[in-house]
Image (spheres, rainbow, N blue to C red):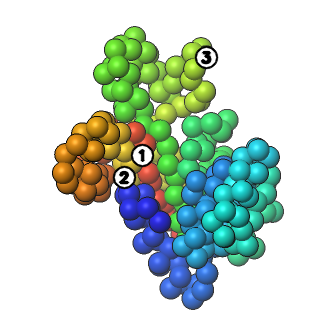
């Protein structure tokens, strides 16, 4: 898998799942139909069930899985969080992913309860969400100051009425931790993804010797460090299900 902060957390979690299960980790990826996460996880030796409402996204997943030679390790099912009770692994998943999901669902608490219920006792729920404050900062730096102000003032961090904004909400780290705890999870980590890497121009990395490696190392170090974490493009949290 890749070496960014999110993948490092997932790799550690899956290593622990292998020890618990003494076998192949079971992963349930909710809303991950195109396979961005499922294919690398299957390539790492996991059995992955992907649940997504979009048949087109699932078709993309199946093509990616075939190209990567991991089609036999991925099960693709059309559905949403309401279907998890019947389509997830019978004993619960070692790891449940809700990456890029909570920004779009109608009911965040209900969706998180469904993700939690789909995890095995002692398993984990991983969520990746758009960071509200990063969205404010990015728009301000781009000169879209009125949009930045609207995002900052809106309690859900959204641009209501804007045709180009399809998200129902954005999160900050405090809100993210709160909704996870309300779902019955013990929050073990909250990290940033894209803390600095999304701000550094590619031309700088290409023209400066050692810059890419230094940025990768800095990104890992900054991912868990506040206040840098608070301006990351996305926030990643891992919550533990009670044993």
Q: Quadrant of residue 9?
A: bottom left
The image quarter in which residue 104 lies: top right
Q: Secondary structure at mark 1?
A: strand
Residue at 27% across, 51% down: 212
Residue depth check, mark 3 versus mark 2: number of the one nearer the observer: 3
Q: Position of residue 118 (x, y in %)?
A: 67, 63
> Residue at position x 61%, y 81% from top?
24
Q: Nearer the viewer, residue 82 or 9?
A: 9
Q: Which residue is rendered at x = 76% and y = 44% of the image?
A: 56
Q: Compute the Cα span from label 3 to label 2.
A: 30 Å
The residue that appears at 38% across and 62% down in the rendered structure is 3
Q: Disc 1 vs disc 3: which is toward the camera?
A: 3
- Residue 18: image x %, image y %? 53, 82
* Percent coordinates x, y for residue 238 in the rendering: 46, 59
Q: Which residue is mark 3?
A: 163
Q: Is residue 111 left or right of residue 84?
A: left
Q: Is residue 188 visible?
A: no
* Residue 169 in the image, given as x and y percentages of width and height: 54, 31
Which one is earlier in the sequence, the residue at label 1 or at label 2? 2
The answer to which of marks 3 and 2 sits earlier in the sequence is 3
Q: Residues within 10 Å of mark 2 (few under 14, many from 20)?
A: many
């Amino acid at each position: 898998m890749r070496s960014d902060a999110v993948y490092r957390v997932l790799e550690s979690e899956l290593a622990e799942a292998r020890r618990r299960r003494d076998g192949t980790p079971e992963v349930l990826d909710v809303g991950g139909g195109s396979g961005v996460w499922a294919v690398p996880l299957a390539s790492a030796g996991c059995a992955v069930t992907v649940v997504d409402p979009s048949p087109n996204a699932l078709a993309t997943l199946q093509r990616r899985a075939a190209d990567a030679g991991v089609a036999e390790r991925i099960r693709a099912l059309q559905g949403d969080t309401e279907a998890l009770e019947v389509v997830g692994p019978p004993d619960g998943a070692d790891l449940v992913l809700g990456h890029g999901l909570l920004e779009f669902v109608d009911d965040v608490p209900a969706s998180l309860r469904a993700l939690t219920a789909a995890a095995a006792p002692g398993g984990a729920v991983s969520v990746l969400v758009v960071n509200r404050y990063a969205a404010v900062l990015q728009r301000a730096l781009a000169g879209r100051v009125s949009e930045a102000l609207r995002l900052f003032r809106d309690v859900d961090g959204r641009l209501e009425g804007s045709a180009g904004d399809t998200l129902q909400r954005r999160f900050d780290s405090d809100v993210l931790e709160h909704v996870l705890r309300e779902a019955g999870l013990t929050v073990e980590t909250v990290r940033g993804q894209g803390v600095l890497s999304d701000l550094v121009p590619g031309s700088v990395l290409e023209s400066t010797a050692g810059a890419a490696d230094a940025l990768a190392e800095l990104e890992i170090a900054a991912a868990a460090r506040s206040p840098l974490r608070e301006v990351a493009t996305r926030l990643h949290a891992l919550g533990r299900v009670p044993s």
